[in-house]
Image (cartoon, rainbow, N blue to C red):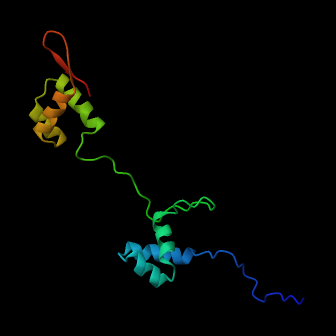
Amino acid sequence: MDLKIRGDRTPQGRKKLSREREAYSRLVQQGYSNAEACRIVGIAARTGRKWRNGPSGERSRKPVPPINPVVPASGSPRYLSEDERIHIADRLREKATVGAIAAELGRSPSTISREIRRNRTDGTRGQWHYWA
């Protein structure tokens, strides 16, 4: 059996596609769709999705972070945050009106009054306390 040694001694494993990945990320940031960016760069659409979203379910390889990491939202503007609830409690102790508190927080007075009604505890002699 006659074996030949290859003239080209570059590794034959997975290609390092760092230049292609950078070009793909630039194209996606410019507004190209995944399919268009992959076609221009010369990679498979599946590879582009992995680069954009990060690998999913592949346990055999080291995970690569996505190009644009997803940052969790700080909170829905629909709900009051903990800081807003603490502000309400502080201002109620200072005997501030619902309208004043709503103006300070940039919320509707009805939102503030509903919050107070939902989270108040009854005390003695008809008094109540807001529980933030």
> Is residue 27 toward the left or the right of residue 44 in the image?
left
Q: Is residue 126 left or right of residue 61?
A: left
Which quadrant is the N terminus positioned in?
bottom right
The quadrant where residue 89 appears: top left
Report the residue that reaches farthest toward the top. 125
38 over 121 or under it: above or below:
below
Q: Nearer the viewer, residue 38 or 17?
A: 38
Residue 130: image quadrant is top left
Q: Farthest residue toward the right?
A: 1
Query: Which residue is outermost to the front?
Result: 1
Above-or-below relation of 12 to 49? below
**Between 58 and 114, the one nearer to me in the picture:** 58
Q: In this view, does 52 lie to the left or right of 63?
A: left
Q: In which quarter of the image is the C terminus?
A: top left
Residue shown at 63%/76% (left/top)? 15
Image coords of residue 55 (percent x, y): 52, 63
Residue in the picture at 55% in, 77% down: 19
Q: Which of 108 and 39 is in front in this view?
A: 39
Residue 13, quarter of picture? bottom right
Q: Position of residue 121 (x, y in %)?
A: 21, 20
The residue at 21%/31% (across/down) is 88
Q: Please state the horizontal and vertical placement of residue 28, each as a whole percent of the image.
A: 40, 74
Q: With 89 as the anchor, is 47 left or right in this view?
A: right
Vertical order, 100 against 3 (above or below): above
The image shows residue 61 at horizontal and vertical percentages of: 62, 62
